[in-house]
């Protein structure tokens, strides 16, 4: 799998988390984008599978690091069991825990409402385990030893519960040919569709406005009364997006976030999104959908024409469009 989780909060929802309490999405530029999660409670994500090694990355802006003492900025878990966590101590430094035991302390002293990028690498083992923590890509904590506090051998969940703001959350495992190591200091910037593309097979509900993108550019919880849909196998709807406005950046991927659900148990039970420049298309595997809306992310790490990493100019061109397709 490699990339297990990506959240930019550009859809202004928390529906990628399995549960979220005392949290909202707010306008914020701490992750280089437009939104962040403001947390005063616990946000928990359960994965469908686990791994003994995992990488976590996120921007963190704690309200008051001293008052956050004991709160888990991030905890890696097996189910509801906390295997380890990163917290603040009373001296405003990051404190590393294995299970319920503190094992290492960082040296950097945080200020109130200061935002930094954090990465954590965890390898579970009774004796040769590793936990490394980076702040702004600089190694802050390097712990080796027993990182497996109990009988659990895999990480299959994580949570945030510190008071503050989180942005640009990424989780990688070590499988797959890419995204299997440190995510790096990644910024995410979202764009809403601003025009229809070359394919317009999907129905509009309601019928007015007639443009599909105006039914799809809202954020927040999906509105089932304002959608585009099709129950015909092979129907397509494409969308175009505005320039991202970046001047200097390395583009790691183009990600398309959709709220999708199936209409019934008949045709249209799967959803598919492709990226196209009207000459070539980049394939993506169909996603099995449920009858409830959920966020589906289609991620493209290379340009479909060159099959090479994106250049900044390529990622900014408006000739690329995302195509939704109804498939059985």
Image (spheres, grey):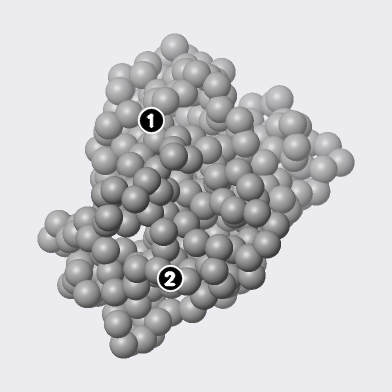
Residue at horizontal 28 percent and vertical 69 percent from the top: 197
For label 2, the SS is: strand
Q: Residues within 10 Å of mark 1 (few under 14, many from 20)?
A: many
Specify whether residue 89 is in view.
Answer: no
Give x and y (percent) for residue 142: 54, 45
Residue at point 19%, 59% (across, down):
242
Q: Look at the image and tell me in which quarter the C terminus lies.
A: bottom right
Please give the residue where the numbered disc 1 appears in the rendered image: 25
Query: From where the camera sits, is residue 327 visible?
Result: yes
Q: Is residue 230 above or below residue 112?
A: below
Between the C-alphas of marks 2 and 1, the distance is 31 Å
- Write down the quadrant of residue 96 in the picture: top right
Q: Is residue 163 left or right of residue 122?
A: left
Return the residue nearer the eye: 289 or 306.
289
> Is residue 109 shown left or right of residue 106?
left
- Say which element carries label 1: strand
Name the residue nearer the viewer: 222 or 121.
222
Q: Quadrant of the N terminus?
A: bottom right
How many marks overall? 2
Identify residue for label 2.
236
Horizontal relation, residue 25 to residue 270: left or right: left
């Amino acid at each position: 799998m490699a990339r297990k989780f990506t959240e930019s909060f550009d859809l202004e929802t928390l529906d990628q988390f399995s549960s979220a309490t005392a949290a909202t999405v707010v306008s914020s530029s701490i992750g280089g984008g437009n939104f962040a999660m403001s947390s005063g409670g616990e946000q928990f994500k359960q994965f469908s599978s686990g791994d003994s090694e995992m990488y976590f990355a996120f921007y963190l802006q704690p309200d008051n690091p001293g008052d956050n003492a004991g709160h888990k900025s991030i905890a890696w878990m097996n189910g509801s069991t906390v295997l380890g966590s990163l917290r603040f101590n009373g001296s405003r430094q990051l404190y590393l825990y294995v299970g319920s035991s503190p094992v290492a302390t960082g040296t950097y002293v945080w200020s109130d409402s200061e935002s930094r990028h954090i990465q954590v690498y965890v390898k579970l083992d009774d004796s040769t385990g590793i936990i490394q923590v980076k702040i702004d890509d600089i190694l802050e904590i390097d712990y080796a030893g027993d990182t497996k506090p109990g009988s659990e051998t895999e990480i299959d969940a994580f949570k945030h519960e510190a008071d503050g703001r989180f942005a640009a959350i990424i989780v990688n495992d070590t499988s797959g040919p890419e995204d299997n190591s440190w995510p790096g200091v990644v910024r995410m910037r979202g764009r809403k569709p601003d025009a229809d593309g070359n394919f317009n097979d999907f129905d509009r509900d309601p019928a007015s406005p007639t443009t599909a993108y105006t039914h799809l550019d809202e954020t927040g919880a999906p509105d089932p009364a304002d959608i585009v849909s099709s129950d015909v196998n092979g129907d397509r709807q494409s969308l175009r997006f505005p320039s991202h406005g970046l001047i200097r950046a390395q583009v790691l991927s183009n990600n398309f976030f959709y709220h999708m659900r199936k209409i019934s148990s008949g045709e249209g039970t799967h959803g598919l999104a492709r990226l196209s420049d009207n000459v070539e298309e980049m394939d993506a595997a169909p996603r099995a959908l449920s009858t409830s809306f959920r966020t589906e992310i289609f991620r493209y790490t290379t340009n479909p024409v060159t099959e090479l990493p994106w250049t900044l100019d390529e990622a900014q061109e408006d000739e690329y469009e995302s195509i939704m397709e109804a498939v059985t």
